[in-house]
Structures are given as C-alpha cells and as structure tokens.
C-alpha cells in the first residue's frame, strides 16, 4: 500500500522486527512493575494500550505510524501476556498449575488458527486488523471484574484483602463461606531489608544456573517456533491453511505437557 518495494522493501520485515523488539522491552519491564504495583492494574493497563495501539495500527495513515504502533503494541502485548499468565497461575493452587499454564498457552495456538480463518474471510488488511483487535475491548471490560492476585496481596502483607479474594474464589467454586485467617509470611521483608527483585536470579547459584538454562531453552524454542510460523506463507499450498496448521499442530502438545509436568522425575 505504501509502495514498499525495491529500496524500501526491507520495511516490510522491519515492522515485524520492531514488534518483537517491543516484546523484549515489555517482557523485561512489566514483570517488575507488576511486582511493585500489583498484577491486576498492570495487566489492565497493558490490555487497554494494546487495544488502543491496535486500532492505531489499523488506521495508520502512513508507514511510519504503522511501524511505531507495531513497536508499541509489542511492548504492551508482551508485558500484558506475561502478567496475565502469572495472574492465572496465582489464582489457583499448585495442583492446578500445569493445567492453567498449559491452557493459557493453548489459546495462543488456537488464536493462530482462528486468525487464519479471519484472514481468509476478511482480505483487506485494515478491516482484518480492526476485526481481530475488537475482541480486546470485550476482554478489557470483563477484566475489571477480576480480583487482584491473592498471592501478590499476601506477599505485600495485605492479609485482609487476600482473605477477601480467597473467599470470593471459594464462593465462585460453590463452596460455603470459609472461616479463613491467613498468617503473616515468615519471609515478609522487614523495613530495614531490601525487597527481593530480579537480581536475585543471578545472585543465588542455583537460581542463576536455572535462569541461564531456561533462557537458552526459550531462545532456541522461540527461534525455531517463530522462524517456522512467520514463514508459513513461504510454504507451498494454501497460505491460510498453512498458517492454520502451524497453530493447530501445537494443540496435541499441551496434554502431553500437562502429563509430563505432573510426573515426579
């Protein structure tokens, strides 16, 4: 549309690179922010700006605004997705972590397939961007009904608020009102102590090695995964079918993940 050919052809892939650069920034910054300010406000703020910048992308009058909006979408999308994953994990007990963690990531795979279907039905890219971005408005409105993470409240010493959230969750699960009284955590930070932070991942020997190993695994998996997914259009055959299959092929992996995570190695 903006004559991105010949000497400007690189700008096509540049927009995707800017999006992933934004993801990197969002993943680094939103985690500590949610530790400090709370899961819910950071998640809702990220989702709000994700929707706003998504509409800017769809309505961009020129390439520069389009590219800038993709970068900003990357920041808030990456950060919001990270915080939402943590939030869903902290709503449930340890025995459900493998289920909720796998289910959260399953939506990503299904979303790719649904997006391929939308792309087949809505061929004009601006309309496609508007349609795919609009469900975010519904999710944003529904998110205001979510409680704050009880684990985060507990870690901040807000016992009464954490108890209220646990009561709310119990009632939602059909349980009778609990006689619940939380005890202060033995790990509560005193005023003369520094609060734990991201640097603890490199200070502690065991955490340091686990962090290095996990970072390497994530790097390799992401490199292969996005290399295949983003280049699905280069494969022979129907473009939309290839994109849909690139998402659906993940679905069988999630039950396997739940099975292996639950095993005692």
Image (spheres, rainbow, N blue to C red):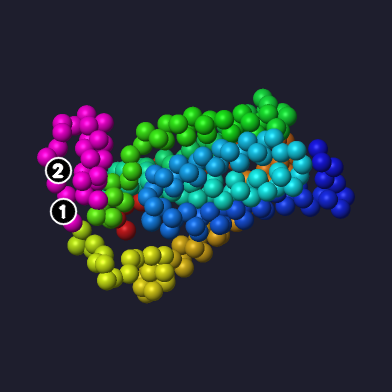
In magenta stretch: residue 82: no
Query: Where is mark 2, residue-wise?
Result: 180
Label at residue 144: none
Relative placement, left or right, of 89 versus 172 is: right
Residue 149: x percent and y percent? 32, 46
Q: Give the magenta part as a residue range.
A: 158-184
On screen, 264 above or below 201?
above
Mark 2 burial class by Cα count in 10 Å: few <14, some 14-19, many 20+: few
Q: Give residue 245's position: percent from left, percent from top.
A: 60, 37
Mark on residue 183? 1
- The residue at the point 47 percent across, 54 percent down is 30
The quarter of the picture where the N terminus appears is top right
Q: Nearer the viewer, residue 155 or 122?
A: 155
Percent across and percent down for residue 62 are: 77, 41
**Looking at the image, how many numbered discs can be counted on the residues?**
2
- At 55% from the left and 60% from the top, the residue drawn is 219
| Residue 133 % position (x, y) | 58, 34
- Spot the residue most to the top: 121
- In which quadrant will I find the C terminus? bottom left
The residues tagged by marks 1 and 2 sit, at their Cα atoms, a distance apart of: 10 Å
The answer, for residue 142, to whether it is visible in the render is yes
Classify mark 2: helix, strand or loop.
loop
**Residue at x 64% of width, y 50% of height:** 71
User: What residue lies at 65% left-to-right and 34% top-to-bottom?
Assistant: 129
Side of 125 where 218 appears, left or right: left
Which quadrant of the view contains residue 148? top left
Residue 258 in sight = no
For disc 1, the neighbor class at 10 Å (few under 14, some 14 to 19, many from 20) is: few
**At numbered mark 1, what does the secondary structure look like: helix, strand or loop?**
loop
Is 179 situated above or below 71? above
The reply, left or right, for residue 165 in relation to residue 81 is left
Q: Is residue 163 magenta?
A: yes
């Amino acid at each position: 549309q903006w004559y991105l050919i010949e000497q400007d052809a690189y700008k096509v892939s540049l927009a995707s690179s800017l999006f992933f650069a934004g993801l990197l920034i969002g993943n680094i910054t939103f985690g500590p922010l949610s530790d400090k300010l709370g899961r819910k406000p950071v998640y809702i703020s990220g989702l709000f700006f994700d929707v706003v910048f998504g509409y800017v992308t769809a309505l961009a009058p020129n390439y520069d605004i389009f590219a800038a909006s993709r970068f900003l979408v990357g920041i808030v999308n990456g950060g919001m997705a990270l915080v939402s994953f943590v939030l869903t994990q902290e709503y449930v007990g340890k025995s459900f972590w493998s289920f909720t963690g796998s289910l959260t990531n399953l939506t990503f795979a299904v979303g790719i397939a649904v997006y391929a279907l939308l792309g087949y039905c809505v061929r004009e890219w601006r309309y496609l961007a508007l349609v795919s971005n609009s469900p975010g408005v519904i999710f944003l409105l529904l998110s205001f009904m979510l409680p704050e993470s009880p684990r985060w409240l507990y870690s901040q010493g807000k016992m009464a608020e954490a108890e209220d959230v646990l009561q709310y969750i119990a009632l939602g699960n059909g349980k009778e009102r609990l006689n619940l009284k939380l005890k202060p955590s033995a790990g509560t930070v005193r005023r003369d102590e520094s609060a734990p932070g991201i640097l603890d991942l490199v200070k502690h020997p065991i955490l340091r090695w686990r962090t290095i190993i996990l970072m390497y695994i994530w790097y390799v998996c992401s490199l292969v995964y996005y290399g295949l997914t983003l280049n699905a259009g280069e494969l022979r055959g129907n473009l939309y079918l290839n994109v849909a299959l690139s998402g659906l092929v993940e679905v069988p992996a999630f039950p396997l993940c739940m099975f292996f995570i639950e095993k005692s190695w």
